[in-house]
Amino acid sequence: MSEVLVLVDHVDGAVRKPTYELLAIAKRLGEPSAVFIGAADKAESAAADLAKYGAEKIYTVDDAEVKGYLVAPKAEVLQQVAEAAGSDGPAAILIVSSGEGKEIAGRLAIKLGSGLITDAVDVDGEGNTTQSVFAGSYTVKAKVTKGTPIITVKPNSASAEESAGAGTVEQFSATISDAAKAARIVASNPRQASGRPELSEAAIVVSGGRGTGGDFAPVEGLADALGAAVGASRAAVDSGWQPHALQIGQTGKVVSPQLYVAAGISGAIQHRAGMQTSKTIVAINKDEEAPIFELVDFGVVGDLHSVLPAAAEAVEKRK
């Protein structure tokens, strides 16, 4: 059985949930193998976590030569790991579909002469992918036909499954070219923690729009009751009620949670493009003719300032 490489998405050695989801998808395609690029002293604990979710082999790469630069060195690391996998190469390479992940994937596809598919929301055992394209107007089935399939997958596209793998650790030494070090990071400012899940990875998202009138307290109250992330429509961001980092839509973030709650959002195509691959969609809007009701699983015609606090109270009672 051929290896399927999964690039580990982590923060200072703490593996993030989308990586475990990719390992679940990797099992459909072959033997899951994780590639951890990070500090040497964090590799052991990360490897133990990865093995719990089915990683049969874990390549650990000391990031001493990688950190401090943009994504080009990571693409070279993945290239070298893939080329070391044998003449046939890995069955596929899976990467989380983030801004950085897609850039790594693009560079890697050129280096390996392989086909690339981005923003997949499903991958079956034959390597066929599902994508939502053109602002959600079409659902596309696609498959890489040249080289090693390189696929970036949106968070929440699969369920993370605990299933013990062999977890064999192999230290891998990569050689980084001078060309890959042409762009250095000179400063970075970590985003202030909100205590809520990362928007693009959250299993539940509660979003507010123009209908909030700038009062996001009901939205945040329900989000906290559900353990959800908070999002916003472009109208809410343009009005200065929420930062752009929380904007969901064609010019913001694209999310695909298990549950998406849209409160006071009309459902313009710009917003729909960022959330309509959500598994279950609930909308609250005073206007029963709002376009958002065309794609929801459940709709409530009412004032969000009354509905959301009542829903939050009910959730807390159930807890």
Image (spheres, rainbow, N blue to C red):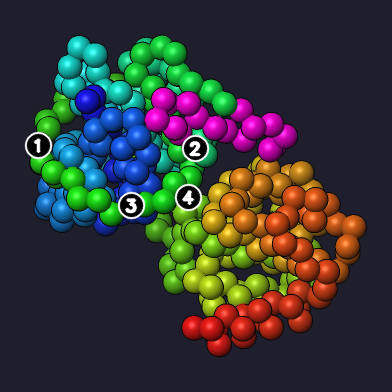
**Which of the numbered marks, if any, corresponds to residue 122?**
2
Callout 3 touching callout 4 (CB < 8 Å): no
Mark 1 crowdedness (10 Å alpha carbons): few <14, some 14-19, many ≥20 = some
| x and y, in percent, of residue 294 in the image | 80, 50
Q: Give the Cα separation between the discs numbered 1 and 3.
A: 25 Å
Q: Is residue 94 magenta?
A: no
Above or below: residue 85 compared with residue 24: above
Q: Give the Cα separation between the discs numbered 3 and 4.
A: 12 Å
* Type of amino acid at the residue the image marks with label 1: Gln
Above or below: residue 301 compared with residue 314: above
Instruction: Give the residue at mark 4.
Output: 156
SS of the residue under disc 3: loop
**Which of the numbered marks, if any, corresponds to residue 161?**
3
Which residues lie in the magenta part?
122-140
Query: Is 201 situated left or right of 64 in this image?
Result: right
Above or below: residue 125 compared with residue 252: above
Which of these two is toward me, 38 or 16?
Answer: 16
The residue drawn where x is 73% and y is 44% is: 270
Between disc 2 and disc 1, the foreground one is 2
